[in-house]
Image (tube, rainbow, N blue to C red):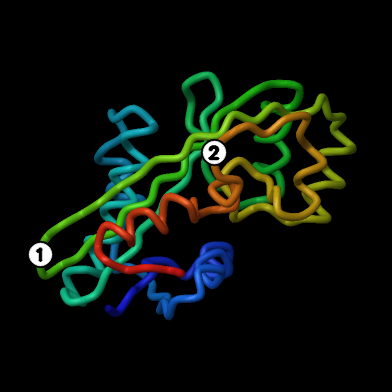
Amino acid sequence: MRIILASTSRYRRELVKRLNVPVESLAPPYDEDADKAAHAHLPIEELVMHLARGKAASLAALHPDALVIGSDQMGELDGARLGKPHTVEAACAQLASMAGRAHRLHTAVAVHHGASGRVETALDTHHLVMRALTAGEIERYVRADDPVDCAGSYRVESLGIALFERVTGDDFTAVIGLPLTKTVSLLGRFGVGVL
């Protein structure tokens, strides 16, 4: 069965390659910002699931015979959302707000089959404790890793791991952008085996 990843994220593309099944990567025709604003009232866990389903559904409508994988990720600090910072200044400010504190990172995955309308979803939540960091350490990290396109302003798969005292959760790949253990399980529900 044809499998499409509803993302052009380099992080998710690299992760899904590990599964050793042919997966196309396409940009979903989905206005994430508008949908996020329209559903801002949802709890963060529900919002991230909604966005993952929306991405998958937008491509499943165009490719009904394919399985479409959608994913979304959002950090949470004291109940407030931590998204992608988009600028160096915003990344530094976001990291400063998390320094020495614990936060959660929610990563949702949805697999949608357009022809049947069937959707299977899963959520992975990691608890992360960041080290106490100086402004200089934060600035040096952001300049070195350039995490402006990452939820939470860090890349744990590279130098960003040095920001943390502890990372706790089920599947470390979720922190990078796609929980592969859950993705394999969801694909299996559609009869797609990886091994």
Q: Quick one: label 1, few (<14), some, or many (20+) residues within 10 Å?
A: few
Q: Position of residue 43 (x, y in %)?
A: 34, 27
Q: What mark, if any, has residue 28 been given in the picture? A: none
Residue at the (56%, 69%) spot, across then down:
18
Q: Nearer the viewer, residue 156 or 140?
A: 156
Residue 85 appears in view: no
Side (left or right) of 90 relative to 30: right
Tell me the distance, in whole angstroms, between the alpha carbons under discs 2 and 1. Answer: 30 Å
Q: Quadrant of residue 5?
A: bottom left
Identify residue type, mark 2. Answer: Asp
Q: Relative to 111, does residue 2 appear above or below in the rendering?
A: below
Q: Nearer the viewer, residue 55 or 93?
A: 55
Q: Relative to 93, does residue 69 appear above or below in the rendering?
A: below
**Label 2 secondary element:** loop
Q: Which residue is mark 2?
A: 170
Residue at the (33%, 74%) spot, across then down:
3
- Quadrant of the snapshot with the N terminus: bottom left
Residue 113 appears in view: yes
Residue at the (51%, 29%) spot, across then down:
76
Q: Quadrant of residue 93?
A: top right
Q: Relative to 194, does residue 145 appear above or below in the rendering?
A: above
Q: Nearer the viewer, residue 84 or 166?
A: 166
Q: Position of residue 84 (x, y in %)?
A: 55, 47
Q: Residue furthest front?
A: 195
Which badge, 2 or 1, comes first in the chain's sequence?
Answer: 1
Q: Quick one: label 2, few (<14), some, or many (20+) residues within 10 Å?
A: few
Identify residue type, mark 1. Answer: Ser
Q: Nearer the viewer, mark 2 or mark 1?
A: 2
**What count of labels does the image hold?**
2
Q: Which residue is mark 1?
A: 116
Side (left or right) of 181 relative to 175: left
Q: Are marks 2 and 1 in contact (CB under 8 Å)?
A: no
